[in-house]
Structures are given as C-alpha cells and as structure tokens.
Image: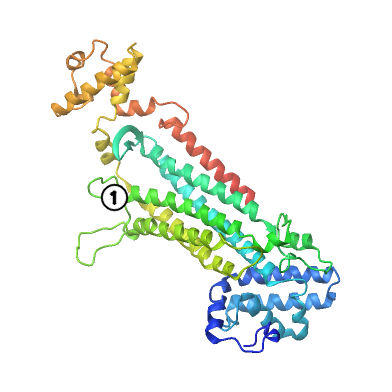
C-alpha cells in the first residue's frame, strides 16, 4: 500500500520497516475516538470557511458511515495500514474521492494522535471509575453486615487489638476512595484539546480550536502548541493512578489469600471464584486473588516503560511516543479486569464470624485495654503497661487468658483491679469503647459506611 509521504522518497520502504513502524495492530482500538475527533475537525473546517460547508457535511456523513461499518463488522481494519489515522483517511478518500483528502487540512498526525489518546483515556477513566464505584459499594455493603463481627487487628502480622471485620475492610474503602479522587483529578488535567497544535507550530489557517474543544466536550485547549503534541503527562499520570489501584487490590488480595487458608479460615471463597488442582482433589485455590497480586507487577512495569520512554525525549514529537499506547492499554485492560473480578469475588465470599471471634480471643489483643483500665484508676500508663505485660506472661505460663483470670489473680498484680475489669477486657466492649472518630466502634463504622454511600450517590448524580 502506498504511503501518504511516498512523494518525498525515491525508494520503497523495506517491508520489515513497515511492520516495525506500523501501529494499526494496537491503535485500531481508538477508531471511535479518531472518527469522533475527525468529525469535530471537519465541522470546524466548514464553519470557519476553510473548506466548503457541503464538503464538510459530506466528510462528516461519510465518517459516520465508516464508524457504523466498523461497529457492525462490515468494515475491517487493514493490517497493512500504517496506523488507525491513515486507515480511516484512506477509507474516507476511497468512498468520497478528493473531498476526503480535505479532512487533514490544518491538522497533523501529531496533534491528531494526541487528541485520540486523550479522548480514549477519558472514556477509559469513566469506565474504571465505574468499576471502583462498584467495588466501593460492595465493600460498604459487606462492612454493613459486619459492624459487630469482632476480629483481631494486626501489626507485623501479629494479633494486636480488637476491631471488627467491617472496620477492617472499610480501611480498603478509604484507599479506593483516594484512587477515585486521583482519577477524577487526572481526568480534569487531561481534559484539554491539543488539536490545532499541528505538527508542533500550529497552522496558518484561521481555525477555531475552542469550537473543536466544545464539540468534543473538553474544558478548554492546550496553551502551547509544542507541549500540545509532546505532552504525555496524562498517560503517565493514569498509569501511576492505576499502579496505586493495583497496589491496593494486591494488598487486599494478600489478605484474602491468607484469610481463606486453613490456618486462618476467616473466609471462604465462592466456588465460582476459586479453582482446583490437577492432582490434589481437595484443593480450593484463590487464583483470582493471586492473579490480581501478580498482575500488579505487570501494571508497575507499564508505568516504568512509560517513564523510561519519555525521560530523554527532546521536544516535540518523536516516534518513541508511539510506544505509549501498548503500555497504557495494557495497564488499563489489566486494571479493569482485576477490579471487575475482585469485586465479584468479594461480593460472594462467606465471612466466618465464629472463626474470627475465636481467633480474636487469643493473642491478648485486649492487653492495651487492660492497661488503660489501670490508667483510668489513676496509675501512670508506663506502670500500667508493665503490669499488664507481667499479666500476659502469667497467662501464657498458665495457659489462660485475661478474661478467664480470677479477681484474686488480678489482685496479685495490682489492688486497683475490681469486678469491672471483666467488662473492660471484654472484646466487644473493647471495640465499642473506642468512640474516637474513625475508630472501630459500631457507630463509627456505620458513619464511615454512610460517607462512602453518600460519595457514591453524589458521583452518580453528577453523571446524570
């Protein structure tokens, strides 16, 4: 197939160079955005009198037909085409003749591809935010069922203090909430049209960049034509955002993997989101969580690819920047499938309340509450801390726990202990006595859940 730029060269392109240079195999996924951008560009050319109105209308009509044919499968991509931009233009020219050649007036592939990637990623961010919203809703719904399900909170993977399962997983809701806010901010910074920047120095045609931006629902236009074609910050920023999403999913996946093991036994995954073994018939493996954990490294790799690709590029456009698409597409694809499957896995898992409570009763996770009890009786905290440490050592030696000690035994360590010590070290009381904002008490967790639910309602209303 002849190239648009063949007139400059005296020798045909090497076939291997063509394959190496071509991006149609991966940028074809942006065909809707490419056509949408071209329709806006053609409309602007007609309104500005740069091409005739009837030519603009003919181009727009033909572009809409091409879009419909690609959507239906009546038209397929030519693997020999250099990229999606040239493919669409060649099909357009084949259908309407020389009028189709007027579409690229006052435009370069440099600003065209910069436009397409912003349009495409803008759409992807909307989808990803929808998936995060579903995950947040699932976490909130699950937490609401477990505001009184006592479990051990951990530090250093050692039992530390009593919380509830609802409080525990609402910590992840906060992580994904921040992820959503970051994505919204990335979208805001991304939502400027680079079209009209040309190859790097704009154009001598009297175009209306703001009209194109308005037609494409951008908030404005980029301020510098060189930056307009050479900026990939939004691609990098999205890759970073997705790396954080995946990191949070990976941490949660690690918890799931531990919790559904026989050693913990805190949850059971639904059969639909588990796999078996080829040799061990008893196995029920958390492969979804493990793959999410594994794919996190892949998304990190995409971010590293993009950062490395951009780090030494002079202004303005360089062919290296073609490498942005496969990396960001991979990051987007993996984040989306991980969010979707993780949400479904979490929604269908069974939380084993009794096992959580049984584990919480071991490990002396109410020792801090025992120390606080003495402090409230007038003892300095450091003295109370030492006494409770000796109490724990005593319990370990006698194979018992704080709740099972007699008052006589308590008195051996301090005369300040009274009958009310048993209420003070009761795990449920330990949890609900923590009324501090953001803490694990039932009222606090219910408030945390209500905040997430309100946030989801607000973002849903803003989309209407």
Q: Residue at x 31, y 25 (%)?
A: 368
Q: How is the image coloured?
A: rainbow
Q: Is residue 240 above or below residue 208?
A: above
Left or right of 233? Residue 357 is left
For the N terminus, which image quadrant? bottom right
Q: Residue at x 53, y 76 (%)?
A: 25
Residue 10 visible in rendering: yes
Would you identify the image quadrant in which residue 325 lies?
bottom right
Q: Is residue 68 above or below residue 317?
A: below
Residue 296 horizontal/vertical position (percent): 42, 56
Residue 355 horizontal/vertical position (percent): 26, 41
Give the residue at mark 1.
260
Q: Residue at x 34, y 14 (%)?
A: 380
Left or right of 459? Residue 213 is right
Residue 415 horizontal/vertical position (percent): 23, 10
In this view, the residue in front, 405 or 335, is 335
Would you identify the image quadrant in which residue 409 lies?
top left
């Amino acid at each position: 197939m002849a190239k648009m730029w063949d007139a400059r060269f005296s020798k045909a392109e090497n076939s291997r160079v063509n394959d190496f240079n071509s991006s149609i195999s991966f940028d074809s996924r942006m065909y809707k955005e490419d056509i949408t951008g071209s329709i806006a560009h053609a409309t602007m050319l007609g309104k500005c009198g740069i091409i005739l109105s009837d030519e603009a209308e003919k181009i727009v009509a033909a572009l809409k037909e091409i879009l419909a044919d690609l959507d239906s499968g009546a038209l397929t991509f030519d693997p020999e085409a250099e990229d999606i931009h040239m493919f669409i233009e060649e099909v357009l020219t084949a259908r309407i003749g020389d009028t189709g050649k007027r579409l690229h007036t006052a435009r370069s592939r440099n600003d065209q591809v910069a436009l397409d990637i912003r349009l495409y990623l803008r759409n992807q961010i909307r989808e990803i935010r929808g998936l995060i919203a579903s995950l947040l809703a699932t976490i909130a719904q699950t937490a609401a069922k477990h505001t009184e399900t006592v479990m051990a909170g951990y530090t250093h993977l050692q039992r530390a203090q009593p919380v509830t399962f609802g409080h525990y997983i609402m910590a992840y809701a906060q992580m994904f909430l921040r992820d959503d806010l970051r994505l919204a901010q990335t979208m805001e910074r991304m939502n400027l049209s680079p079209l009209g920047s040309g190859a790097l120095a704009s154009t001598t045609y009297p175009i209306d960049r703001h009209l194109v931006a308005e037609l494409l629902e951008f908030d404005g236009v980029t301020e510098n034509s060189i930056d307009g074609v050479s900026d990939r910050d939004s691609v990098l920023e999205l890759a970073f955002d997705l790396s954080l999403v995946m990191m949070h999913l990976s941490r949660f996946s690690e918890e799931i993997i531990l919790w559904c093991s026989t050693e913990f036994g805190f949850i059971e995954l639904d059969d639909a989101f588990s796999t078996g073994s080829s040799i061990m018939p008893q196995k029920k493996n958390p492969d979804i969580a493990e793959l999410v954990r594994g794919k996190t490294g892949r998304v990190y790799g995409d971010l590293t690819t993009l950062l490395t690709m951009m780090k030494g590029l002079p202004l303005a456009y360089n062919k290296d920047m073609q490498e942005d698409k496969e990396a960001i597409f991979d990051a987007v694809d993996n984040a989306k499938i991980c969010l979707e499957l993780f949400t479904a896995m979490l929604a269908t898992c069974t939380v084993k309340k009794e096992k959580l409570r049984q584990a919480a009763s071991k490990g002396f996770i109410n020792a801090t509450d025992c120390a606080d009890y003495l402090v409230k009786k007038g003892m300095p905290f450091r003295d109370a801390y030492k006494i409770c440490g000796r109490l724990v050592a005593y319990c370990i030696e006698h194979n018992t726990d704080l709740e099972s000690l007699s008052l006589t035994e308590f008195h051996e360590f301090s005369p300040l202990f009274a009958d009310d010590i048993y209420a003070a070290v009761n795990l449920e009381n330990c949890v609900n006595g923590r009324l501090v904002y953001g803490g694990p008490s039932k009222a606090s967790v219910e408030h945390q859940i209500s905040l997430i639910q309100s946030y989801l309602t607000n973002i849903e209303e803003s989309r209407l």
